[in-house]
Image: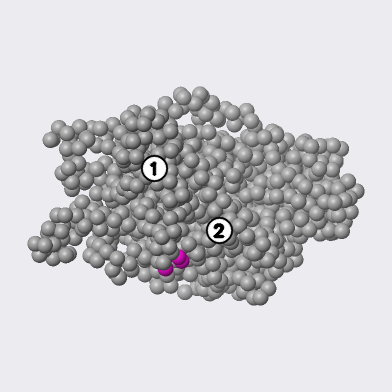
Amino acid sequence: MANILIDTRRRRLSDLFGSPRLRRALSEPATLIGIILVVAHLLMALLAPIIAPYDTSALVGAPLQRPSWEFLMGTDQIGRDYFSRVVAGGRIALMVSFLGVAISLFVGTILGVVAGYIGGRTDEIVMRIVDSMMSIPDLILIAILTLALGKDVSALIPVVAVVYTWGVVRVVRAKTISLSTLDFVRAAELRGETRLAVMLREIFPNLIGLLGVELAVRISSAVLRISGLSFLGLGISQPTPDWGLMVQEAMGVVFTDPWFLLLPAIMLSSLIIGVNFMVDGLSRAFGIATAELG
Amino acid sequence: MAITKREFLQLLGLGVSAFGVQPFITGSAAAQTVDGLPAWAALPAGSNPKTGGKLIYGQTYPNWAVGSSDNGKHPYYWIDLLTRSIWNSLVWIDHDYNVQGELAESWAPSDGTLKVWDFKLREGVMFHNGKEMTSEDVVASFNAHIAQKGSSFITKWFEKVEAQGKYGVRFILNAPYAEWPYALAEYRLAIAPAAAPDLILTDGIGTGPFKLVSVDNRRGFQAVRNENYWMKGRPFIDELEGYVVNSQTAINGFRSGQFNAVFNIDPTTAAQFEGAGGIVHKSKGGDQFLISMPKNLDIAWNDPRVRLAMSLSIDREAINTIVYNDPGSWVGNDTQMSGLNREFVPRDKAFDIATAKKLLAEAGHPNGIDLPPIVFSPSFPEMPRIMAIVVESLKKAGINMDIREMPTDGFDAYVKGVNPPYGRPSAGVVGPRNPAINLGRMVANDVEKGAWTGEKADAYAKLYAETIAEPNEEKRIGMYQELQKILQSDTPAIVLGGRRNMLAHAPGVQNLKSHSQNWSSRFDDVWIES
Amino acid sequence: MLASIARMIGRRLFMAFFILSFTALIVFLGTEVLPGDALTASIPAEELQFYSPEQLAQMRSELGMDRSIPVRFLEVWHQLMTFDFGTTIMKKESVATRIFHPIVNSAIMAGLALVVMLALVIALGVLASLKPGGRLDNAISTTTLFTYSMPDFVVSNVFVIVFAVWLGLVPAVIFAPTNAPKLTILAAAIVPVIALCVHGAAYQFRLLRAGMVEALNSDYVERARLAGIPQWRISVIHALPSALIPMLNATAYFVAGLLATSVVVEAVFKFPGAGGELLRALSQREIPTIQAIAFLAALAVVFANLIADLAILALDPRVRTRSSNG
């Protein structure tokens, strides 16, 4: 991260949701659209079992039916309700991404703060590992880890965690270094607080906004990668509904039934657009510089 | 049934078929030729084939062995399984599962022990390098196939092969095998010019209808007409090209006019080809999907009633209809036999949820049952859809069983990594062949038989050994049927359904047919209308 | 001065060595802690039943799969670092020969993508920064966000349908063999590269735009503006060089992302590159091939980073006097 804007004010948790900033952010239509999309996606993922009129794996009608009142988005190649599958198609990927990214944020923050604050040899070692891990293209790394850990959905969580930790370390370390030079950190050090206390009480609270951005951005990136993997046949597999898998299936009937491709593609894109618009707007409002994209 | 060699030869000489020597002279019958062609190679009545043109096909089912070699000129590592574009084998299995002479003109066992088999080769067959094919080449090719483990279906019996003059070879087996010729039709068992053991089969030279120009075994090949092909006047097309592509790319390539044929289309995609003027040809059969259930662990299906209940709950007709759009087509009976085998014995009633529930109740599961998950690797594109239908139909009978898709990589190791040698419960594909190979699997294949033991398993193994040693074909048919009845009564494995192999071609392409044994497809009888 | 540059390059090379060694370790651990092994995966299931466990064990020991992990790692490390990628598991054919053309083809595609993308990103970045927050800036920023949000596999498929099947401008299936003349490969790479740019340009664009905005707000640009130098000249000659630096700093991340996306794009276009080779190797557990491709991908990233560092050195004299901070 090259250009971290430095906010010199010492921040506490309660300041984060300072309402004028939030209001300013919400006044921008793109940010508002982003937030609405993200909230809609979260609600949809959480409530999928309630929203979906049919069991996602049940054969409820003749295959490849056109949309009707009975089947709002028609039926798929084996006669499952497509609406139910579209609604649930992001659940697993989102859940896996959320858990994986949460782990990577936890580990990445610890490594990043320690490397950035302690510096010296520790920093050197951590950063060389980060450089190495980030030199392997993420898809190749995911593929290799999937080979090692198996293709089970639960195995994808550590895979996501391993892949996304290093980017977090980089960002957190950069921010920590810039924070370390600020007066309130210096003051705490002069008060004789331990390094651990400084890291926990002075530095960490100031990272929360950044971590929020990281969480959203990395989750959307992970969802995109997982669906890409599913598309290539390396990720989530049948009968679990997944947008990447649905795009792949839809390609087989794209010339006769193009909406099978459009629906999951739109769902996937709207999630990513939503996250990016939201993050863009909020980080601008809260002065968290970021150029990273999900 | 003991018959001395002398008696046997006498019978042969008399040409009497009442004693069941029919199978042995089938080979001779195939030697009859029409216009210098074997009878089986005749074109449909009224055809008026044109010469010339180029067939460019897409293939969605690659040869999985390709990745293990860079030599695409070796038949084992040919880009797809359709090796008969460049090579020939001694025999070929026709669309009705009969053995037909390809490079062999006729064959017969030399005596009633069924351990010595003589093959008479076609004369005047030229390799692409201009050399004539002789017994020396056939002997060298088979020695290479044994050394390189070309086909598991012959290694178990093969003892040695020797030349009998310029146009004859003799196979000597270590046990009687009445249906030996059938096993020689495998796509890998190509005949190549004799060469040193490390060179033979590596140069892409065969006797087939097309001469290889170039091959990139990761992508495709180009070949041109073999002017000296042993079938006079064939092939009709000048050039043949094939490319391995996935299902979507195949559709795109066909619709953009780059391909004029696509092999092994995903049945669901048929409309994408037809929508662009394509014609879809379905074979009568194809690979079958089999669930193997290890019975050496403490699982409810150790009770044969549970296994039968599972089989009776599966709505195969839904698979026929939804996946293959072909109701009433496939029947099976939980053996590796399909309705296309003439020895096939159907179950009385294959889909019967009421009986299934009753059987479950009798077995102590009146409220349904949870079974361990079955794993599979999706070698054909429609397989995940078939498994989804099976899971749903089992659910309706109160049987909860997950069928999980696993990556193709390491699948076999994953299955066999536990519970050796039977492995974990899994679903796999079984190629359609003759009863000797089909029914032999429940003796030889540990995974498929899944620790099937007990009186019935013993009786089955014993009867199988007797059957393939039985020279009388009529009797053999009866014995094969008996074997299937034993399997049906104990259901050691369950067959979920069977494929219909499908290909799509442009309207100008004539006589291109999908073969139930995908690997037995031919190109020497195809022509293109301008 | 020259000595400090040499020292920096030396330091970079040493780091590159460390990174590649560590990469070798990761790849080795990932591929060798496998649940199965490569041998059984390469024999067709139908055939495998007739091999006895003893036969398989013998084949396995011939392949060296029964030795201790550190010994095997040292071997793998040594092989990778000396570009001796060993032989394929089943047929013992040279991996290097096998992947040479795919790697070159992918390098051609990635190289073309890099050039096209840089040109595109610089053009867009300059245009957007002419009037930050203006209509053009908003249009470009929003559009790139939209294109970024379209999954690469969807974009590629739609491109094939539109450009090949409907418009017939390019072939839907690239028939060119892996060892085709490299000009043919270059021509075949054009549409895939456009698909790559649709998805990949957004990230670089945002870095550049941020850099441009910052540079345009600096004092010396203000002075230039007061001196009456036209805006486009200020943007291109005065702001752009320093604005490129943050973008170049993120080169490793960018190139790694480009290579990852190109695996997907290659698969859809059937481009004869390393991506397809990697997917095949993955599905067959052809471990030496996976190791070689992953290692070469990391090498490409490290190399690109090295070039970027030199470019930064050329663009920003201040860096030369400062000690490198990694």
Give B193 or A273, whichever is nearer the viewer. Answer: A273
Q: Quadrant of the N terminus of chain B?
A: top right
Give C260 or A197, whichever is nearer the viewer. Answer: A197
Q: Magenta stretch?
A: A29-33
Vertical order, C60 against B165 (above or below): above
Q: Secondary structure at mark 2?
A: helix
Q: Position of residue A117 (x, y in %)?
A: 36, 35
Q: Earlier in the sequence, mark 2 or mark 1?
A: 2
Outermost residue to the front: A191
**Pointer 1: what residue?**
A172
Asked if marks 2 and 1 touch (Cβ < 8 Å), the reply is no
| Chain letter belonging to callout 2 | A
At x 25% / y 32%, what residue is drawn?
A: C11
At x 33% / y 61%, what residue is drawn?
A: C190
Q: Can you tell which quarter of the image residue C196 is in?
A: bottom left
Give B335 or A188, whichever is nearer the viewer. Answer: A188
Give neighbour class at mark 1: few <14, some 14-19, many 20+ (Cα, 10 Å).
many
Name the mark on residue B356.
none
Name the mark on residue A42.
2
Q: Is residue B77 left or right of residue C186?
A: right
Q: Position of residue A86 (x, y in %)?
A: 59, 63
At x 63% / y 60%, what residue is drawn?
A: A48
Inter-mark Cα distance, 2 to 1: 26 Å
Q: Position of residue A203 (x, y in %)?
A: 40, 40
| Chain letter belonging to callout 1 | A
Dot 1 amino acid type: Val
Dot 2 amino acid type: Leu
Give neighbour class at mark 2: few <14, some 14-19, many 20+ (Cα, 10 Å).
some
Vertical order, A120 against B352 (above or below): above
